Image: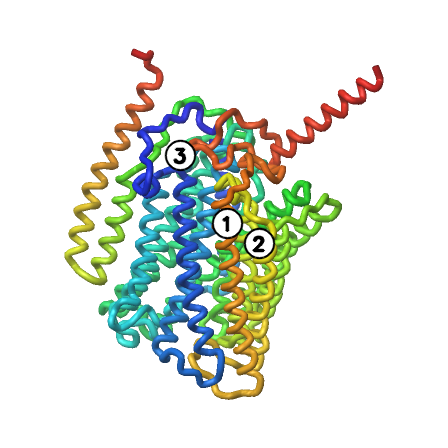
Amino acid sequence: MRGGAIPLLAWGTLLLVLLLGNWVWTQDTVQVGLFAMATGIIYATAALFIALNRQAVRRGPPAPASEPEAIPAASLAAVLVGLSIACIGFGLVWAGFLIYFGAGILVLSLGRLVLELRAELRAVGTLGEPPR
Amino acid sequence: MTATATPVPAQSRVSGWLGAATSTDHKRIGLNLGLCSLAFFALGGLFALLMRSQIAQPNEHFVSDNTYNQLFTMHGSTMIYLFVTPMAIALALYLVPLQIGAASLTAPRLASTGFWVWLCGGLIMESSWLTADGAGRAGWFSYVPLSNGTNTPGVGQDLWVMGVLLAAIGMWVMGGCVVATIGRRRAPGMSLMRMPVFTWTALASMLMVLGAFPALIIVMSLLFIDRHGGHIFVGFNGEIDYQDLFWFFGHPVVYVMFFPYLGAAAEAISVNSHKRWFGYGAFVGSIMLFAALSMSVWAHHMFVTGGVTNQYFAFTSTALAVPAGIEYFDAIATMVGGSLVLRTSMLFGITFFVQFLIGGLTGIFVASPVLDYHVNSSYFVIGHFHYTLFAGSVFGFFAGVYHWFPKVTGALLRESLGKLQLAIMIVGTNMTFFPMFILGEDGMSRRISRYPTHPGWGTLNLIESIAAGIIALGVLTFLVNVFVSLRTRVPAGPDPWLGQTLEWAAPSPPPPLNFDGPLPPIRSYAPLLDLRHERHDRQSHEARQEIAS
């Protein structure tokens, strides 16, 4: 998508300037490290956008998309992944067996996720085929 | 013309509760998040009422000291981690794809996962009330050494830590999805400088989520390890490091809780003034500068520790007044010369700016280390941040609710009940929070469950406690309004306010892929206003030609 990385790069650069100010003024390793982490995350996200589409650094309005795209209506796998992560977290505090239970659900839900993604690819693939 | 050439729904839709729970539609995820946040708001409000009952009078014994500690911890935590921040994300999830002409979010499954992780985190945090030791009780920031395993033992505090950790992970994931959607799914023609004002505020807010929330995730993980024998935050340096890590999240989150509500108030003011938002370019620049600066002010919360360089943080904190001033100037200039309609959303929007001004000005006050030494840990600080977060953000939230409720439900809210709610809330808010400045200046300390008899303190605290009930009455009026408006529906139609941005081109409520037909041409950040102007110009031209012939 055209221009998608520009606000991230601009904002990341503003953070970088403030980071340099902090570094010069405070000389505090933890503070500079935190600031560098945030700046790095923003630049890394921009880099990801650019890697996905070179147009992301070019200015101007985006052009119409040419490829059809599958948009999921529902996903049980997404819900189960969320619940399993929470289950592992709860298990860390309260009952150890929940860690294993959550890990099991996580594996199963990731399997379900693969099935959902394959169904999506099939849906896009059949779009161009003539009706039977 | 939509963001995707041919969106293909990959699965058949599931209806009912299961459908709502598993939906990857950004509107459903936004609604789920918003409704759950509202439920947590009610809970956090209840904690506030219980706290205010305890300190309504000197030497009160309504609850024990330990219970009071739990109440103020859970009030702050519930409001920040489970209401104001997620509600800001919910608004962004619901509205941003509609405003940029997208059919869906980028990575909608990830957003759904994020919602469930956040919700479970919230439930885990609140479940700490059920433990023998009680709920988390070391404050919403849980400073060490107070919050370590020795000083605050028990499962309740552990559940609090895990709840915050999971809620932060969930919000970080959802925030990332919004940034990716803006970056990758804008409709053809929707260049960056044609994005609506709300979308820009949501982008600034979600960039801060992306950059700052990892610090919270890290610090809560480390605190959890510390509490279980890790001994990570040891000695003075360890305590300062904890505070640095926490406030690197803790201050930016104040603006995460502010920008989307600022955007909502701005949209309400602009639409009800029948004018474009004044100084769009300057506004966009100021929002990005505001967001960056607010990432660099965190240690003003640590002025009194003696462990930070106060000059740098005083400088950046005071500099925040510059972008804030631009936003106020833009809001006033938008109304000047406009054809103003004083609907409830407009009134809430104006009140947002007025109320937040008190929070903002007292913010400049405490940005000065010398003045901060004087008022630190007093009720002055409580008054300041409640003016920014409640008197500011919550009024902006209601501006957004009254503005977009017809879009979300297809029904209009009752204006008379809305204005009644506004009046009640203005009275309640100012009676609750303004006396806090006087009490703080007079030396009343925050986080105390009992205070001695002192001239004036009892009266001011009693006024605050009664007024907290008035705020609750205002919220109740809103709930009655929602109930009445949904029960006896006045159909809104797609564009009841003569909106300016793309969401008003969609039916109310919007269909699964958002837009039924082609989008209007996008030549500015107000494409619907452009369309009306063109139609008006064409009609005028035709009328002139008819007269001439």
In the rendered image, which residue does mark 1 sit on?
B484
Task: Look at the image and tell me whether residue A33 can be seen.
Answer: no
Residue at the spot 53% in from the left edge and 73% down from the top edge: B464
- Residue type at the position of mark 1: Val
Residue at the spot 61% in from the left edge and 60% down from the top edge: B423
- Residue type at the position of mark 2: Leu
In the rendered image, which residue does mark 3 sit on?
A51
Q: CA distance from mark 2 to mark 1?
A: 10 Å
Share a chain, discs 2 and 3?
no
- Figure disc tally: 3
Residue B87, relative to residue A115: is it above or below?
A: below
Binning the other alpha carbons within 10 Å of mark 1 as few (below 14), some (14 to 19) or many (20 upward) gives some
Q: Secondary structure at mark 1?
A: helix
What x and y, as percent, mark residue A4? 48, 36
* Observer-nearest of B431 and A95: B431
> Left or right: where does residue B186 sit relative to residue A90?
right
Label 3 near label 2: C-beta < 8 Å?
no
Label 3 near label 1: C-beta < 8 Å?
no
Label 1 near label 2: C-beta < 8 Å?
yes
Of the two numbered discs 1 and 3 in the rendering, the one whose residue sits closer to the viewer: 1
